[in-house]
Image (cartoon, grey):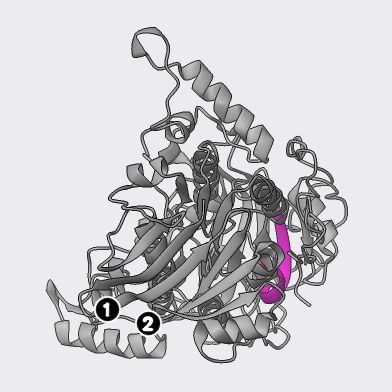
Amino acid sequence: MNLELQGITKRFGSLVANDHIDLSVTPGTIHALLGENGAGKTTLMNILYGLTQPDEGTILADGKPLTIHSPKDAIAAGIGMVHQHFMLVPVFTVAENVTLGDEETRALGLLDRRRMRRKVRELSERYGLRVDPDALTGDLPVGVQQRVEILKALVRDAQVLILDEPTAVLTPGETEDLFRIMRELRASGRAIVFISHKLKEVQAIADTITILRRGRVVGERPRHTSEDELAALMVGRSVQLRVAKTAAKPGRVMLDVRDLVVPGGHEGLPGAEHTAAVNGLSFRVRAGEILGVAGVQGNGQTELCEALMGLLPVTSGSVHLNDHDITNAAPAMRLRSGIGYIPEDRQQDGLVGSFPVSENLILDTYNRPPFASGPALNLGEIRATAERRVKEFDIRTQSISAPVETLSGGNQQKVILAREVGREVRLLLASQPTRGLDVGSIEFVHRRIIEERDKGVAVVLVSSELDEIYALSDRIAVMYEGRFTGFRPPDVPVEELGLLMAGIGGIGTPGDGAADSSERTPPGDSANAGPGSLEQPDSPERTSPGAVQPDGPGPPEQAPPGATGPPEPAEPAGSTERAGSTGAAGSDGDDPTVTVGKPT
């Protein structure tokens, strides 16, 4: 089916989201859309899928006008879509969500749940996506929910398939497998619209690239166009694609986690209900360093961050921040003690969508001076702070009074970042901090995280993006089935990291820091103490960054000698390694090599 969009225009009040956009998608091609967050890509695709109605313009299918009032019309016309923000029913199982609207029935119209589950298992195996069909969708971490969305779209035989940031939570191996599927769909004559902020992926898979900026088409390029040119077209300026940073200068231990066990709070992977989400984890993070946590989504990273933030209970083990035991402290107390938290799901856990930007910027300090005096809010100070942070963090909003849900994903993430690092923090927990962001927003977030590190903040970075792990980390820990399979320096080969992500080869841990002598200081030492301490320091003396504490080494960081469980299921025929692959799986011969690991 030849699909054409002519003069598509969409306004939201004074904001022009799409400004007379022309786009042509032909059968047997993969057409990529690039653009900043808020450039109008998702709005345009929502119009094509019937979720939003255009103010002007025409949609043509094989040269004939096509009217799309709803997703039902789009599906009937042969158009399917995987959304960036999930369109799932939380109280339904995976199988029910995947087959919703296309249910298997028995006699008398009764649902055939056995056939539905079998269909999901077959799809999971075929496409290399590991999901339990009986899991309740609302209990799944975001990475597994993304897999459900992909399965949900692939189960329908659409002639035009829209993929809105489909690889945001996939490992390199899973991304390669998705690319194999996309090539198969292209070879069968289907058209694919691929929205992504990852320039290497677009170059590897797309036949044509259309770039949007501020609601307008600013260029159309072949896939062989350089990254620098594509990035400049996206944001209207040159972009630093590689993180510039100096060597870390780690100080004293700021976060000390020992033998931490967290019950499985996010099921969804086969067998997850029988194991702890975090299983006896021990590690330390020093002031002024970034510990990057790599791993396939769903191996306990979400639960680790939530337990460190006090959002999940701890079965056993201990957590110390700046020498103070916070194992059983409430989230509010952890915030006061100096933890900043960037959650992986910004809409669900990081923002109150209906609240204005100004109030979202002070959610964790609204009841403290200077924003409050007793029960009364200081509205003037709240407005002044919001205006200052909007300017400093380049948050693009019509007004600080606008509901934060009206902002693009990148600007929503900037609101969270501004709130968390706009106050004095000792530890920054950053979980998937650039998920779904464009290159301009990624550049900004990365720069701010490095600035926090250089100010002496300890950073725990959890990311499914290996490029991000390599670019930011001073040390890398790999998580598999609730345990760290190894600690590595940031120059570890991609292939070795990929094996660790699959639970293989966890023998030897160069760079794990076990031999370091800088440990926790005895309680009462006020080194690096500041506002919000859980205990009052006994002495005003401060320990200089990098000073060796006199109390000797603590427990070595964990590095089990082997895999803690069975490896991931075998990849389908034609796929490459699950991680660290440098070739495009199932290439049809004309696709360039895609590098999905360490940047050069």
Q: Is residue 70 magenta?
A: no
Q: Position of residue 208 (x, y in %)?
A: 62, 69
Residue at image coords 35%, 14%: 109
User: Considering only vertical position in the picture, is 267 above or below 30?
Assistant: above
Give the amino acid at mark 1.
Leu
Q: Position of residue 576 (x, y in %)?
A: 80, 49
Q: Which residues are magenta?
A: 469-478
Q: Position of residue 323 (x, y in %)?
A: 55, 68
Q: Which residue is mark 1?
A: 15
Q: Is residue 304 left or right of residue 247?
A: left
The answer to whether one can see residue 532 in this image is no
Q: Is residue 59 left or right of residue 2?
A: left
- Where residue 75 sits, quadrant-wise, is top left
- Where residue 56 sits, quadrant-wise, is bottom left
Give neighbour class at mark 1: few <14, some 14-19, many 20+ (Cα, 10 Å). few
Q: Which residue is mark 2?
A: 395
- Where residue 359 sits, quadrant-wise, is bottom left
Residue at image coords 58%, 54%: 27
The mark lying in front, picked from 2 and 1, is 1
- Number of callouts in the render? 2
The answer to whether one can see residue 232 in this image is yes
The tag on residue 567 is none
Q: Between 145 and 23, which is closer to the camera in this rendering?
A: 23
User: Considering only vertical position in the picture, is 156 above or below 111?
Assistant: below
Give neighbour class at mark 2: few <14, some 14-19, many 20+ (Cα, 10 Å). many
Give the amino acid at mark 2.
Ile
User: Gap between marks 2 and 1, in whole Å?
Assistant: 16 Å
Task: Report helix, strand or loop for mark 1.
Answer: strand
Q: Earlier in the sequence, mark 2 or mark 1?
A: 1
Q: Between 65 and 530, which is closer to the camera in this rendering?
A: 65
Residue furthest to the left: 376
